[in-house]
Amino acid sequence: MSCITFILVILALGWTLLRFAAGRYAPKPRPDETHYTVTSDGWRIAIHRWRARGASPHGEPVLLHHGYSANHKGFDLGVGSPEAPVPSIAHALADRGYDVWACDLRGRADSDRPVPFGERKWNWSVDDYIHRDDPAIVDYILFRSAYSQLHWIGHSMGGLLLFCHCGVHGSSRVASGITVGSGIDYSDSGSYYIPLLRFHPLIRWMKRNHLGLISKISSPMDGRGHTITEEFNYWPSNTAPAAGRAIHAGVINDVSGNVTKQMTTLFSPGGFRSADDSVRYADKMSSIETPILLLGGDRDRQAPPILIDRTLSQLGHARHAKAQFGPEHGHRDHYGHFDLLVGLRAETEVFPTIFDWIEKHPAKKKDAAAQPGASPKAKSKRS
């Protein structure tokens, strides 16, 4: 066997094993419908819907917004067992009567993604999320709703984008917000991201960061010990092994290099900035009128408790609040980054806090004359 043939066989075997792992351990979300809207620059964005049900299907809309490298599947992994439960915040909210939507930003899951030799390139930044993707998502959800406001629950970067959305576009269309492991100024926070900044000169010129590929490769090993990789994303003893494998097999995606480059500004004094460095988004925090609840885990290695405290002080108004989770706060185990939503005890220890906050800040209904309809720029299909 020639050297080239041997290499090709190894690559083919590796690809087969990767596909096997991704298929076996991948999340299995169960939305009722998948809808699509189009951004101002022509990207098709997927929004997945869990229809309101339960005893009181009032239909207040809730946007579940994923983070830096994630997609909508993190809110409904569709795995687990009675012995090792993996809750779904999407189904839990729908069961309480909310109209639940989870987005995929450009480049993720069911939204438009770059393909080899195609027109779409790996060249967008976080500013494209702020000025194009998120406005299109909010427009679409509210156009189809009987309400003029929605609730926004953002995990990690999804919470950062909530701050930016309200700071840039105003708070009038967001009735309440909940951030999960989020902040806007990570400098001197102790985040595990900070040691990784030494690789910034190496990755800043990369058009595409292959986080999804790396994550899929590692997924079969997750849930079999307490590793630094697992601890980075969730607290292992508070997370079912199936949840950990599902997160790494199907929730984490490749990321645009420009997004990574802009996200590194989080760790500079003063925090997150626009791609051209002209806007410091922390300066807009005190103007946010939407009441925001900041959720944090005591062992969150990405967004440590000190970050949650700092972010609350930057919001600077009594309408905002925080809730920390871990043994010191009366809970059975520590909490990391993802397990605030998918942990073994999240359904009984975290979800009630989420429900209470959005119930205290109900969304406003539209006037009778303003009826929901179908946007001419949007398409939908039933799953």
Image (cartoon, rainbow, N blue to C red):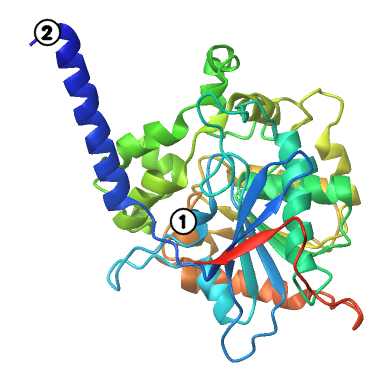
Quadrant (top left/top right/bottom left/bottom right) for the N terminus:
top left
Which quadrant holds residue 350? bottom right
Of callouts 2 and 1, the N-terminal one: 2
Residue 321 at x, y percent in the picture: 74, 61
- Do the residues under discs 2 and 1 have CB atoms within 8 angstroms? no
Amino acid type at circle 2 is Ser
Under mark 1, the amino acid is Asp
**Residue at 45%, 67% in the rendered image:** 30
The Cα–Cα distance between marks 2 and 1, rounded to whole angstroms, is 48 Å
Q: Residue at x 55, y 70 (%)?
A: 351
Crowdedness near tag 2: few (<14), some (14–19) or many (≥20) residues, C-alpha within 10 Å: few
Task: Work out whether residue 97 or residue 324 is closer to the camera in this orientation and state it.
Answer: 97
Mark 2 or mark 1, which is nearer to you? 2
Answer whether residue 13 is visible to the viewer in this image.
yes
Q: Secondary structure at mark 2?
A: loop
Q: Position of residue 284 (x, y in %)?
A: 87, 43
Outermost residue, left side: 1
* Residue carrying label 1: 339
Please state the horizontal and vertical placement of residue 372, each as a whole percent of the image: 79, 74
- The x, y position of residue 360, in whole percent, is 75, 77
How many circles with numbers are drawn on the protein? Answer: 2
On residue 15, the disc is none
Q: Residue at x 38, y 42 (%)?
A: 230
Q: Nearer the viewer, residue 153 or 114?
A: 114
Residue carrying label 2: 2
